[in-house]
Amino acid sequence: MREIPPTYPTRLPRRALVTGNQRLTSTGTILVSFRVVDEEPFEFEPGEYIAVDCRDPVFGYRRSPYCIFSPPNEDRTFELLVRVVQKGPVSLFLSHLEAGDVIGFRGPLGKSMLVFTGEEELVLLATGVGLGPFHSLLYTILPRGFSQPVTLYWGLRLEEDICLIESLEELAGTYPNFTYRISLSQPSPAWRGLRGRISETVPPLLQSLRNKHFYLCGNGAMIAEMTAALAHLGVPQTKIFEESFFNHKFKPEPSRVQEICSRFVATDLISPYQHLKELLGEK
């Protein structure tokens, strides 16, 4: 068993044993499985994350948050869906882990996704590994009997980025109220699904905005743009759940927000333009 040194030696983190490390795509998406081996309680809800500690030879001690992919369980296990990037020392660290390694982590931390009333339709918009917390959410609420429609829109770049279809098909085949669509921003000519960014392809598909709870996860640019557009169209902020993985401080251009708004066909919650100006910080 190889134990990886913790990030801060004077502040011992929690400990988890690596039980698997699966390469899902050729473009850098992996699924890493863990079992908690310390004696502290380990309970979480969909949407919460753990912070992974590692020691980088160049940058020293590093820590990065990752939303939990797996649903809550009593086995003290969790999974992380990770996009490996060459300038991301923690993602590279995770990509090299092997079964039997022990890492340091902190958590669970963050906010639960279980904030809806149970009487609303759920519209989930994810980019890239933003699918991770939605996987946890879906495998939690659907087996518990959530009966309102749940629609997942997953934005990726290439066909080579697509993975986890077996899980999505299992959910769609088991629960008639769940459907999903994949939208590619750089598809090949052979691609038969949605073509474009989800901020472009999803608005024309939403016939109504009323009685829906929107969940946005992944690229902060998509989240900021869609949040502004939805707010302009009358969706209350309390009905928009956001979880940004990067581009946290992105500020959408008003012209871009207007372009997205123009793609919506739903007109049942139109609000004044002043709402949009306030959201964008304009006077």
Image (cartoon, helix red, strand yellow):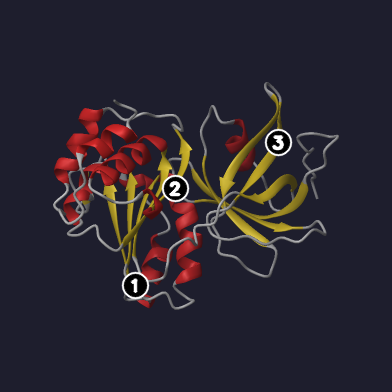
Relative to residue 41, is residue 115 drawn left or right? left
The numbered mark at residue 148 is 1
Relative to residue 214, is residue 94 drawn left or right? right
The percent position of residue 205, horizontal first and vertical second, equals 19, 55
The percent position of residue 211, horizontal first and vertical second, equals 29, 63
The percent position of residue 166, horizontal first and vertical second, equals 41, 65
Q: Residue at x 46, y 33 (%)?
A: 248
Judging from the image, what secondary structure is the residue with disc 2 in? Answer: helix
Nearest to the observer: residue 19 or residue 143 = 143
Closer to the chain start, of discs 3 and 1, is 3
Q: Identify whether 120 is placed above or below 227.
A: below
Query: 10 Å neighbourhood of mark 3: few (<14), some, or many (≥20)?
Result: many
- In the rendered image, which quarter is residue 6 located in? top right
Are the residues flagged by discs 2 and 1 in contact, CB closer than 8 Å? no
Give the amino acid type for the residue marked by disc 2 in the picture: Gly
Would residue 172 be seen by someone viewing this image from the given angle? yes
Would residue 157 be seen by someone viewing this image from the given angle? no
Q: Identify whether 60 is placed above or below 118.
A: above
- Separation of residues labelled 3 and 1 (CA atoms): 41 Å
Give the amino acid type for the residue marked by disc 1 in the picture: Gln
Query: 10 Å neighbourhood of mark 1: few (<14), some, or many (≥20)?
Result: some
- In the rendered image, which quarter is residue 104 located in? top right
Nearest to the observer: residue 273 or residue 36 = 273
- In the rendered image, which quarter is residue 173 located in? bottom left
The percent position of residue 241, horizontal first and vertical second, equals 42, 51
Q: Nearer the viewer, mark 2 or mark 1?
A: 1
**What residue sits right under mark 2 in the picture?**
130
Farthest residue toward the right? 10
- Separation of residues labelled 2 and 3 (CA atoms): 22 Å
- Separation of residues labelled 2 and 1 (CA atoms): 22 Å
The numbered mark at residue 283 is none
